[in-house]
Image (spheres, grey):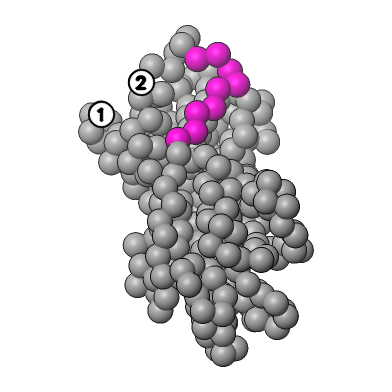
Amino acid sequence: MAIVEPRGFCGEVALVAHAVRTAAGSFGYSTVRSTFGADGSAAATLLGLARRTSIDAVAVIAASCTDRFDYARVADKVPVVVVGGADCEVVPVVATDDRAAASRVTEHLLEDGAANVWHIAGPEASFEAREREGGWRGALERHRAPAAPVLRGDWTVRSGYVLGQVLARESGLDAIFVANDNMALGVLRALVEAGLRVPRDVRLAGFGDLPDAEYYSASLTTVRQDHRGLGNLAIEVLEGIRGTLELPWRHTIPAKLVIRESSKR
């Protein structure tokens, strides 16, 4: 079985890939790892694997499915499942319900008394980033809260730090929902350097519940994804895929809001 993941990514993607490898092993699969580039499409990588190896299944982590033709060509040869990321019509997708989770963390900040919730999103090309932004917007609309302009980072701590410096200069800054924990760490550093106290002056929440999130200088309120559940579901789909799923097929699993110090007053 091949596990194909984006090159150079870490954090959430690494946790999901590890969960899929673990689940594959429990189902008796041996695995090979391959990567695809920053363009977000794994189709060319999949075709190369299909030509060079005798793989019997493929799990693609956090990919775009824009190249539908090539995905369909590979899926005709071997079972393929996309784990997270894509809105795909030619192969099945299993993913966290990012939109619902982002909505819940935004509602938590509002219900805890925040008058406004700013959002630092991931890259516009990222499906997860768009879903999390959508959840944030939906919660604001339901609560009739103002929507500040979205700031967009690249998932890295550094981009969070730079955007946190921008937000630290905003008057009336009350709460920030950041689309992943790495960027939230950078935001936290920028706020502290600007003399703002978290959570007394600014409430802060992230997404992903990375292993270090509870050890940030203000332990981070965040969203915990069910990586094990994603991994197991991905392999179960591959096990029973032939002739059993009507495409497009997408299944999401819920995530858990983890409330810690950074959002409490």
Residue at 36% x, 67% y is 214
Quick check: can you spot residue 118? Answer: no
SS category of the residue bearing label 2: helix
> Residue at 55% across / 22% down in the picture?
249
> Which contiguous range is marked in magenta?
245-253
Q: Position of residue 21 (x, y in %)?
A: 32, 41
Element at badge 1? loop
Asked whether residue 93 appears in the rendered view, the answer is yes
Is residue 102 rendered to the left or right of residue 54? right
In-front residue for pair 105/237? 105
- The N terminus is located in which quarter? top left
Q: Which residue is mark 2?
A: 239
Residue type for callout 2: Glu
Q: Amino acid at mark 1?
A: Phe
**Residue 145 placed where, x, y %?**
71, 57
- Real-space Cα separation, disc 2 to disc 1, in angstroms: 9 Å
Queried whether the magenta region covers residue 252, the answer comes back as: yes
Return the residue nearer the eye: 252 or 55.
252
Discs 2, 1 touching: Cβ within 8 Å: yes
Q: Which residue is mark 1?
A: 27
